Amino acid sequence: MSAILSFFKAARPVAAEGHFNAKKFTFLRWQTFLAMTVAYVTFYVCRLSFTVAKSALVDLGISPTELGMIGSALFFSYAIGKLVNGFLADHANVVRFMSLGLLISAGMNFMMGTTTNALLLTLFWGINGWAQSMGVGPCVVSLARWYGNKERGTFYGIWSTAHNIGEAVTYMVIATVIAGFGWHFGYFTTAMLGVVGIVVILLFMQDSPQSAGYPPISVIRNDPVEPTEREGSVLKNQLLSLRNPALWTLALASAFMYIDRYAVNSWGIFFLQQAKQYSTVEASGIIGVNAIAGIVGTILAGILSDRFFPRNRSVMAGFISLLNTAGFALMIWLPRNYYTDIIAMVIFGATIGALTCFLGGLIAVDISSKKAAGAALGTIGIASYAGAGLGEFITGVIIDKTAVIDSGKTLYNFHSLSIFWVSCGLISALLCFITAAIVARRHLLQQKTVLIH
């Protein structure tokens, strides 16, 4: 057991050879970043393959209830795994840890293609959820190890687009394979892409600057480091991060944001069909704009926050939350108009992409010790998905309780639900500003301490 733990432990620092070579360091950092991003795209494909295989599985006799059981297995194991593996990633060699997660995920996709037994599929997909949580933590830890405070937002934003690229690859490539060769080959192709991702990780990623013979990024970028972060153990820094009230207000802000995020992803098409009488194709097209706008919003938010709010991105997140809520409200309350609904989804999509980047991890890394980046991400992650699950349940209850049957036809009244959704957005914005105030006060106290000494 000790040999296994030692194998996955963070790589030891390597003694520097000669003077610092900025050009070589930049090349190595880009190599690590691009490898990590490409590999995370394959992680996402391994997570979404079940989505495009559902219709084929229904044709084979698997019921919608069983599909829900299989899908929820990934959801719950991913939420718990994100917390546990986030803590472990801080201690780990991220190259080996991430490779193991992708290997398990690819293996579970292969196994999904070998059976139609619902219980086995639930087991395989639940294991896949845990393996998936071994991808995001190492990526965020790697970003904390390789990028300074004033540049991390840009690269975090670019990395976050891997979600959207993974969706595109799944819906175009894997769906095409399933349509042409069957659901078995859809899963097998996904597994093959996972293997490609593992090769990319092992060939091109580096664990940390220190493991490649360079100083820590805080030294290279001359970022201030608190004594507890510099001298304390990883575990001590993790525990100190959990005592930071800003982390918990941020987690709540993310939880409320995730309610609205999944309100659109899970219920947006249903809402547009029932409340505005769009066809399925029209409603899908409007909601689909959300994902495309999210790519642009995520990248721009990262760049702009590095430029204007590198020390307190929560301020920017608060204003983006208000704009996000405004876009959602426009879609909900404006009369049916295809073009205004598209504009509302562009606003919502661009801002939800930025908020997923900010609240979903970037700010947590900013306000925590870099030795505790994975722990901070895990804390945010479990709160976010708890919010998503609770929001999903409450939304279903409200829809059910406010529906009426008239002449044998079910009519839906979305007034109460609309207030719930918009309220969640406003609460998330308020919590962002509270987080910003806590962070600002913390910076002020740090400056006073420096002046005293």
Image (cartoon, rainbow, N blue to C red):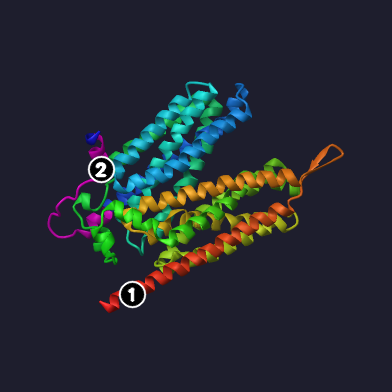
Visible residue check, residue 182 = no
In the picture, which quadrant includes the C terminus? bottom left
From mark 1 to mark 2, how far is it between C-alphas? 35 Å
Residue 107, by quadrant, is top left
Q: Which residue is identified by label 1?
A: 447
Mark 1 or mark 2: name the one nearer the start of the chain: 2
- Whether 411 is among the magenta residues is no
Q: Secondary structure at mark 2?
A: loop
Q: Residue at x 62, y 23 (%)?
A: 59
Visible residue check, residue 49: yes
Could you classify mark 1 by the number of other residues whose Cα lies within 10 Å: few (under 14), some (14-19), or many (20 or more)?
few
Tell me which amino acid carries mark 2.
Lys
Q: Residue furthest right?
A: 407
Q: Which mark is residue 9?
A: 2
Q: Is residue 195 left or right of residue 60?
A: left
Q: Residue at x 77, y 44 (%)?
A: 403
Query: Residue 22: percent from the left, percent from the top?
Result: 23, 60
| Left/right of residue 433 with respect to residue 283 in the rendered view | left
Secondary structure of residue under mark 1: helix
The label number, if any, that marks residue 201 in the structure image: none
The quadrant of the image that shows the N terminus is top left
Residue at 38% in and 46% down: 86
Can you tell which quarter of the image residue 52 is in? top right
Q: Residues within 10 Å of mark 2 (few under 14, many from 20)?
A: some
Residue range corresponding to the magenta coloring: 4-27
Q: Position of residue 119 (x, y in %)?
A: 52, 24
Mark 1 residue type = Gln
Which residue is at a point 19% across and 58% down the rendered structure image? 21
Residue situated in front as seen by the camera: 408 or 276: 408
Image x and y of residue 414, in percent:
73, 51
